[in-house]
Image (cartoon, grey):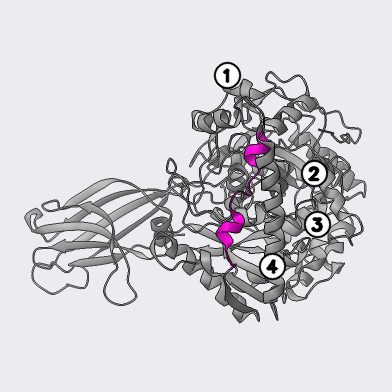
Amino acid sequence: MERGNARRDGQDHGPDHGRDHANVRRRAAPALLALGLALGPALGPALGHPAGAGWVAPLVAQTPVQAPAQTPGQTPFEVSEASIPELQEALSSGRVTSAQLVDAYLDRIAAYDLAGPRLNAIVRVHPEAREQAERLDAERAAGQVRGPLHGIPILLKDNYDTFDMPTTGSTLALAGSVPPDDAFQVRKLREAGAIILAKTNLHELAAGITSISSLGGQTLNPYDPARNPGGSSGGTGAAVAASFGAVGWGSDTCGSIRIPSSVHNLVGLRPTKGLSSIDGIVPLSHTQDTGGPLARSVVDLALALDATIGADAADPATAAMEGRPPIEFAASLDAGALEGARIGALETWLSDSGAEAPVTAAVRAGLDAMVAAGAEVVEVTIPEMDSLVARTSVIGHEFALDLVAYLESVGGTPVASLADIVALGLHSEQLDGTFRRRSQPGGRDEAAYAEALERQSALREAIVAFMDEERLDAMAYPTLRRDPALIGSPPVGGTCQLAAHSGLPAISAPAGFTRTGMPTGIELIGRPFDDARLVSLAYALERAIEPRRAPPRTPALVDGRAPDPLRFSVAGDGGWAGRPAVPRLTGSFSLDLPRGALRYVISTAGVGPADVHAIVLQRRGSGTRPNAVVHRLSGPGLASAEGTLPLSAAALADLLDGRLELALYTADRPLGAVRLALTPEG
């Protein structure tokens, strides 16, 4: 495998041989508190006008100013949910320095990756992240701003080569492996002035979609830590959703960017094969591998893509870009992109029954929003789609051989093959069957491999021909047809193969949330190198539905730490005052947001224990009657209750939105004696 030459920029970065992020000593600046910053003038024109590159210019042309230390009375800058343009405006205006941004993101990692919900999304922090930031602050002070990513802390999936820290694929076998140079996209990020803040966990060697590994362990989903974070870029997805960095890079061989984007309320593009170089990304399948960003907004995605796409002699697939006009994502964003667009809703993957119904409902709401924005949405079915997709994956044919070639190119690794990893037990037990099957001796079945490649070409031609025949700008379907599975249960409902096996571009954009409280995504697939058009369609959808909702378990920090538990209380008689045997219900609550845990102490008066049927938390209905019981707090004969409840994503959202009530049921009033709305303060 040919490797590109790393660009060092004259900087002396000593390699880090296994230093864990838990042990990195952070030079903590005062935590940044206030939530958000009004959209700066650099982004304003883009939000009100269609395509045009002019709105990007202010990001790179403003007179640079070195930010002073925080002064009394000055509103601090909050990194949680901050966009790249917002960060850049704060840097250029002097409100914050890049070094302070690094401190703020590291505070969030300490609060929520190592404590609180313990997301376990970060494998290690770059030991010189702050030094990188200080150098870039000095450049800004000297009048040099490289572009929109200058001084912006970003995250890398730990299968992107970095010459100055290990690249492990989250396998114990490569825990100390430092490559000789940067991956192509990493090199371009450094050139753009991005700060490599940390490496994120992934499903070991990217060979799955639940993000568990022998080196990184199990990553959790910040919306509900009991549920799957997707994969293989699950660490990047969880970290970006929790604002551990401004934006993060992943790789997609069959859904590994799109699936984590879907389950983390993010946007992610699997680019046309050849649009971005995979040189220096630990391979799973060189034919299907692609790399790119996951972001909280389409604007951030576009800026990140613009910085990292391009032809690369070390990746032959990028030769497909020769003779094509440059693709400019940020300049192509158009809030009116859906006007007149014809979208094919893939009926095969839009089931309105069973376990798929909640996701389908959210996706159909997204399609309705497209119609309201001027699109024509038509139901379509690709003829013989199952037959077309069958036997088109080449991962099993390429994985073991590609990994050998990569390890040879790195040199000095303690293992030379997948077979070595298996023989030495340097892998997660959950990957044992997959790794053993794919490391069997005897070589590759060349005839079956050739057939799979031919079938991929046929699939690509069939999809494009179908879209031409139906006059479609894109086809739409759920990124995942079901809510993310509980950790430990097998994930089901994937749709990744349509784009991954055809090489066509596909973007997962947030469609909102299902009734379980989990995010879900709508995927748009397009023609070869129609990537910017897909991103613009996603931008128009984002403007139409504003789907982004931060995980409540990773709120803004207070003085560099997670906020104190939210305390609130309720008391009342349910309107029975003046009547005989008035029941009364009193409850005090403490909500630990990061852990999603509700501590409660509840008592009753005016009713004897023998007359109590139950005390429950109940979802409020639209009328006078409540919806179903969410949690039973006490049962018959118990006039008080005390304990701690772990809340699901849906229950936590209902509580924070004021949709839960405390209810008392008694023998005298079996249909409800007292109902008190729970409204957390703040």
User: Which label sits on residue 185?
Assistant: 2
Q: What residue is shown with label 4?
A: 539
Q: Nearer the viewer, mark 2 or mark 1?
A: 1
* Disc 3, SS: helix
CB within 8 Å, label 2 to label 4: no
Q: Secondary structure at mark 1?
A: helix
Q: Give the residues drawn in magenta, as a range.
A: 382-399
Regarding residue 158, the answer to whether it shows in the image is no
Q: Amino acid at mark 4?
A: Tyr
Label 3 neighbourhood size at 10 Å, few (<14), some (14-19), many (20+)?
some
Q: CA distance from mark 3 to mark 2?
A: 29 Å
Q: Nearer the viewer, mark 1 or mark 4?
A: 1
Which residue is at 92% across, 49% downward? 144
At 83% from the left and 40% from the top, the residue drawn is 187
Distance (Cα) linking label 2 and label 4:
24 Å
Q: Nearer the viewer, mark 1 or mark 3?
A: 1
How far is mark 2 from mark 1, CA to CA? 33 Å
Residue 85: image x %, image y %? Answer: 75, 59
Label 1: which residue? 423
Q: Contact (CB < 8 A) between labels 1 and 4? A: no
Q: Earlier in the sequence, mark 1 or mark 4?
A: 1
Q: Amino acid at mark 3?
A: Ser
Q: Quick one: label 2 or label 1, which is nearer the N terminus?
A: 2
Q: Earlier in the sequence, mark 1 or mark 3?
A: 3
Give the quarter of the image for residue 532.
bottom right
Within 10 angstroms of label 1, few (less than 14), some, or many (20 or more) residues?
few
Is 489 on the left-hand or right-hand side of 293? Answer: left
